[in-house]
Amino acid sequence: MNDIFEEYLREKEPQKKEKGYAWHTAIGLQAVDGLNTSEYLIETAKKNIDGDITFEEANNLIHSYYKENIAHTSTDRTEEADKVSVRIAQLISEKSFVFSPAQYISIHSQLFKGIYKHAGKIRDYNITKNEWVLDGDTVMYGGALDLRATLDYDFLVEKEFSYKNLSMDEIIKHLAVFVSHLWQIHIFSEGNTRATAVFFIKYLRTLGFDVTNDIFAENAWYFRNALVRANYTNLKKGVHETTEYLELFLRNLLLGENNPLKNRDMHISGSLSSPKCNEQNENCTLDCTLDEIAVLNLLKADGKLTQKEIAESIKKSERTVKTITASLEKKGLIERMNGKRFGYWKVNVG
């Protein structure tokens, strides 16, 4: 994705550069749910950055694209990724913001209206989510009966908190705790991380931080895993909740530091269920989505699997599998041997 927006991120014209980062972040954030955007969305984004179309026109183009081209609508959630990306880019570009629970809920509504029936609604049931970084375990999310009261309390505490005379280390620590608590409440059934990220970006700007870099775009999955680790304790396994990973992320985001952000460092097990990196490809899984890891694991077991078989196994469309394998090839993690018809996939990580 760097190559796609590189020309805009280096722009000297402030408006183009700012829009470039907004789109870069919006598309990158889809990785928290393992989603990929379409080529049409990329071309639409470029038109918006160049000033040829407004955000409203971009939104209309994406809606028309899926309304008129039924063949492009599939179960791989690309349509969701495209539509939400436009909305995130627009919200990040807007300067208006109010620090309140209502604003937080409104952001979720704006992002997912017409996509989720529960857009902008507080969930009324309890949830669990199996996490790769927790070896399949789940974070204990807020109870359905207490969600609104918990949300109001956290906002009140943050609103009354004073950052005066704090060192930057103390500010980073506090922000990590605040956003991890906000995320852990998980008031939304789906789209919680993306809504939280957009809200947090806009809040950071009210505190004087620029937040116009590619940290969120390139490390969206790391951000989510860091939120998970900040809210998970398992004394039997010797694992304690920690904001250390979130703090590294925030130091890169807010201070321009270059701390390594590696998902495998956060895994609670010494033997990862995702592919391990070898010495020649140390950062091989840094940017892998959950779907990419799933495909890698399947191909490690049987490199002769067809795209149809992979799609059935991970419950995705063949189109999505094609996108995933292309991404893995680009990263050097797999390569096709002996041609398309009689060949197989060679996995280049242990």
Image (tube, rainbow, N blue to C red):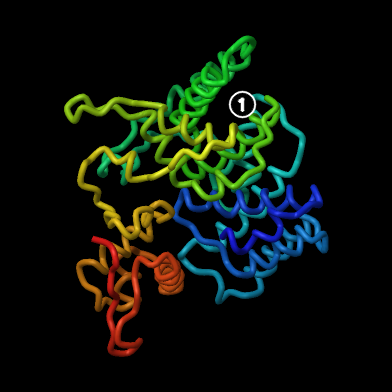
Report whether 65 appears left or right of 295.
right
Residue type, label 1: Pro
Q: Where is residue 170 in the image (x, y as percent from the top left)?
A: 52, 17
Q: Where is residue 16 in the image (x, y as percent from the top left)?
A: 77, 53
* Picture layout, residue 106 above or below residue 320: above
Is residue 317 in view from this perspective?
A: no
Report whether 84 appears left or right of 229.
right
> What residue is shown at x 29% (from left), y 85% (from top)?
343
Q: Which of 215 and 255 is in front in this view?
A: 255
* Picture layout, residue 205 above or below residue 37: above
User: Farthest residue in the front direction?
Assistant: 280
Q: Where is residue 126 in the image (x, y as percent from the top left)?
A: 38, 34
User: Farthest residue in the left direction?
Assistant: 236
Please name the residue that numbered disc 1 is placed on.
Answer: 101
> What residue is shown at x 77% (from left), y 55% (from top)?
56
> What residue is shown at x 31% (from left), y 46% (from top)?
132
Q: Where is residue 64 in the image (x, y as percent from the top left)?
A: 70, 68
